Image (cartoon, rainbow, N blue to C red):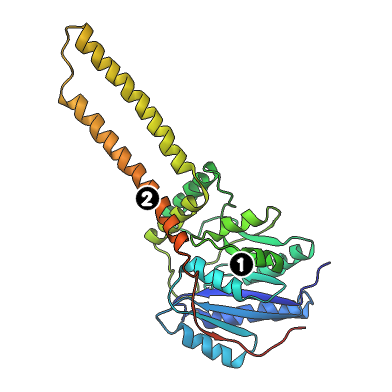
Amino acid sequence: MRKVKLLTVVVPCFNEQEVLPLTYIRLVYVLNDLIRCEKIFAYELIFVDNGSTDETLKVLKNLFEKDDHIRIVSLRRNFGYQGSITAGLFHARGDIVVTIDADLQDPPEKISEMITFFQEGYDLVLGVREDRSSDSLLKRLFSNIYYRLLKIMGVDVVSNHGDFRLMAKSLVDEFNAMTERNRFIRAMILQLESKYAIVSYKREPRIAGKTKFNISELFSFSFDGIISFSFFPLRLASIVGSILFICSTISALWVLYIKLLTVRSIPGWASTLVPILGLGGMQLFFLGIIGEYIGRLYVEVKQRPLFTVREEFSHEKKYD
């Protein structure tokens, strides 16, 4: 059975001043219980302040002053949710690393079950929601369609898995070596490891604060997942373009037949305008998709940093 000398818990934070004290208390209770049960020997809590504009950093500093298990990574600006997780994983030192949201909707008590799977030989353990009953009807519908669409396009994802997961240090090191800028971590991880365990849980309502995701951000995040991991939209553009070319050729031959071999008149403006508008809209749509791919290539080529750190707070503590 594999032993865990040091567990690192990465908690991305953006404007979470209301919930952080409660998050800290609950996490510490769970982690100290893991020590008592000898599932781990030590732990560290890495809070990543993702360019918060409220008192999040001040709250974290207060916690840091009274607990030497805490480390703070303060980013210079908001690098997005995926960027904050990336920063936390980069700074993690543990034998295993757990990523969990600051809002306590993912129950920290499930970390014990995750560690059990790690001890049985799994380097990756995913937290998966049992259902989406806590979401609005619109969000549930959107999520179901989205996950089905990802699978149709060949993107390897686990339905209802967010970013609550456990990773072995070796897997974290491999992840940190990935340099791509357009990040969809829940799919990136599965490109590195196909053998994983699943821990099911019921997502709890947010205790304090407000959600940081709105419809536009969720759509943007979802679109990134498709564009970053699938060439299917480009292939679809080619397929639809080929079909339209065949249809256009058939239409042209039909028009020539009417003109040269019959006495009937050529159909009027409606039959001409509708195909033009339809084809024009289709072309613009697929040009937009191609533009999305080119834009992401542009970002990758520039090789800008995944995150930049303004301040890091860490106690001089060694783990044997």
Q: Quadrant of residue 258?
A: top left
Disc 1 marks which residue? 176
Q: Position of residue 135 (x, y in %)?
A: 47, 59
Say which of 128 and 134 sits in front.
Answer: 128
Say which of 62 and 30 sits in front.
Answer: 62
Q: Position of residue 260 (x, y in %)?
A: 21, 9
Q: Residue at x 60, y 65 (%)?
A: 164
Q: Is residue 214 visible?
A: yes
Q: Residue at x 79, y 62 (%)?
A: 120
Identify the mark at residue 291; answer none if there is no mark.
2
Amino acid found under the numbered disc labelled 1: Asn
Real-space Cα distance between discs 2 and 1? 28 Å
Identify the mark at residue 236; answer none if there is no mark.
none
Up-down: is 298 above or below 305? above
* In the displayed structure image, the side of residue 8 where residue 102 appears, left or right: left
Secondary structure under the numbered disc 1 in the rendered image? helix
Up-down: is 253 above or below 10? above
Q: Residues within 10 Å of mark 1 (few under 14, many from 20)?
A: some
Is mark 2 in CB contact (under 8 Å) with mark 1? no
Quadrant of the drawing holding the C terminus: bottom right
Up-down: is 132 above or below 251? below
Q: Residues within 10 Å of mark 2 (few under 14, many from 20)?
A: few
Secondary structure under the numbered disc 2 in the rendered image? helix
Q: Residue at x 67, y 77 (%)?
A: 93
Q: Earlier in the sequence, mark 2 or mark 1?
A: 1
